[in-house]
Every structure is written in C-alpha cells, then in structure tokens.
Image (cartoon, helix red, strand yellow):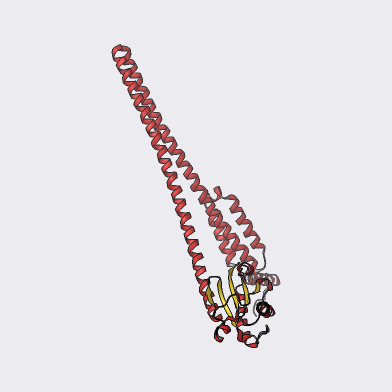
Amino acid sequence: MKPRISSPYLIMALALGAVFFLSACKTAPHPDLVAARDAYNEAAAQPDVEKYAPVELYDAKKMIQRAEKAEDEEEIADLAGLAKDRVEVAVLTAQTKKAREKKLALEEETQKTLLKSRQIEIDKAKKEAEEKAAALSRKAEEARAAELALAVKAKEAEQKAAEAARAKAEAQASQQKAAAMKAEAEAARATAEAATKEAEAATKEMENLKKQLAELQAKQTDRGLVLTLGDVLFATGKSDLMPGAARSLDKLVAFLQENPDRNILIEGHTDSTGSDSANLALSRRRADSVRGALMVRGVNGNRIATTGYGEAYPVADNGTRAGRQQNRRVEITILEKGVKGESMMRR
C-alpha cells in the first residue's frame, strides 16, 4: 500500500500552490512607471541633483507615488510621463545651478588672483620704497635725486593710468556702438523680412484678384476696376434689368462675397436723346435697379453707392447710332479696400 499524506501537509502544499499561482497572475508593473522609477533612481543617485534640485526631485517622487496608486492604465501612463519629465527638469536644474555655481567660483578665484597679484606688486613697491628711503638716509644728495626720480615716475604712472582709463572708456564706447549697430541691423533685417512677406502676400492677392476680374471682364481705370453693363440689358427707356444681366451680376456678387472689404459705385449714363432731366432720372433709376438686384443676391446695401449722370459723360459720339448705344450704359466701379463709393462720385 502507498503511504498516505497526512492532512496538515496536504493543506500546506495547497496553500503554497495558491500563493505561487496568485503571484504569477499579478499584473506586471506598467512599463512607463518602471521607466519613471528608473529615471528617478538614477537622478536621485546623483549627489548634484539631490543638492541643487531637491524640490524638483521631490515633485517627481510624488508624481511616481500618484502613478503607483492609480488604477487606470492611461492615468498611470500620463502620471509616469509627467514624473519622468520632472526628473528631467530636476537633472537640468541641477546641471544649470552647478554650472552657475562653478562659474561664480571661477570668477571669485580670478578676482582673488588679481588681488593677490596687485598685493604682490604693492608689497614689491613698498619694499623698493623702503630700500630707497634707507639709501636716502645715507646720502642726502642721492635722496634728492631719488625723490626727483620718484616724482617723475609718479607723473608717468598718472599719465599711464589716465591713458588706460581713456582706452577702457573708448573700448566700452566701441562695444556699445557695435551692439547698437547690431541691434539696428537686426531690426532692419526684421523690417525687410516683414516687408518681403507683405509684398508676397500683396502679390498673391493681386494675382487672385486679376483672375477673378478676368472672369468679370472688368477693365482698369484711374478710378478703379470698371464693369460695364450695356443698354441691351435694359428695355428701351426703362430701368428694369433684362434676364441677360443675371450672369454678370452673379459673377460680381461672387467677387464681392470673396472680397468683403471692397465697396462699389454704380453710375448710370444715357445718350443725348431726350431731355436732360429725363435722361438724368433714367440713369439714376437704372443705377438703383442694379443696386436692388445685387442686394437681392445678398450684397449689403451699405457697400453700394449709386448715382446717375444722364448724358454728361459720353464715351462715344452721340451723332451715330453705335456711339449712342455705347453711351447708354451702367458702370460698376470696384473700389480699393476701405474706399467709400460716395468719395469717388464725379462732381
């Protein structure tokens, strides 16, 4: 018969197996958290970081502790990333502070060296003066000669000191002038770059504008870009627009919508047939009719100025039929940015 396993041993074996099973099933630490811990431990092991950036290092430690307590994977990753960033801040802070401290120490050492050198010179001069004084006490004549020599040397030293001070002042002035010239050059370069960019933008805008205006078949004048609606778009002696005007007006509306900072001036003209008052009234009604058609299509009326001149401004000879037909027209002037139509009306 096989030996039976006593009950206490069986229970212990089962318990150990459960412990091993649970240990194996335990979730491994988040890789970002492991990286943050490693970065923190590496930084904390550096004496400089502990010395120069204790606050930043402490912040990183607190952030790791928060990540360790978090349960959400995304939150753990975010907190671990923040902790790692703060470790980097601590290391950089320590490096910066140490470099600054080293710089100050070097400056202090340099100052001490200069002071020491000056003291050596002073001691040397003092010793020489004492030796000369002893010599003067032995020989009065030699003392007077030595005194005169010292006076001459003192004068020379004073002159040299004055020259050195002047040279230093000139050097400082030169440095300041160079700095000012450099700043001026940088400002000029920045201004030039801004002007270049502005010119490029203006060129691009102009090219786009030319493309749009080409579709409108507008022509350039000294008053602006002019789109002309001929008399064929109106019934004879009437101000109502014919259906054929819709295409031109639709293109103009599209242009105005793309260029909201441009206003227009609508001016009606007639030939010399009929009375002056009738022609003036007809030209104004036709201009107002075009304005109404544009407003119906969504153009703000505040952007549109209208007037009529009757037969006052012909573009052709009213003595011929063709000339009169050219004179019966409505001109739509597209103004420059910000210009109001009222300011461009003919007086």
Write down the quadrant of residue 230 in the picture. Answer: bottom right
Write down the quadrant of residue 249 in the picture. Answer: bottom right
Q: Quadrant of the N terminus?
A: bottom right
Residue at the spot x=49%, y=68% of the render? 200
Q: Can you say whether 79 is above or below 94 in the image?
A: below
Q: Position of residue 212 (x, y in %)?
A: 55, 78
Q: Position of residue 64 (x, y in %)?
A: 62, 60
Q: Can residue 171 be seen in this view?
A: yes
Q: Which residue sits furthest right?
A: 7
Q: Quadrant of the C terminus?
A: bottom right
Q: In this view, does 48 lie to the left or right of 246?
A: left
Residue at the spot x=33%, y=15% of the render? 134
Q: Can you say whether 309 is above or below 181 in the image?
A: below
Write down the quadrant of residue 323 in the picture. Answer: bottom right
Q: Position of residue 172 (x, y in %)?
A: 43, 41
Q: Can you say whether 166 is above or below 95 in the image?
A: above
Residue nearest the observer in this picture, 109 or 135: 135
- How many numbered discs? 0
Q: Is residue 111 left or right of residue 278?
A: left
Residue nearest the observer in this picture, 326 or 48: 326
Residue at the spot x=60%, y=60% of the render? 83
Q: Where is residue 268 in the image (x, y as percent from the top left)?
A: 63, 77
Residue nearest the observer in this picture, 261 or 274: 274
Q: Is residue 139 visible?
A: no
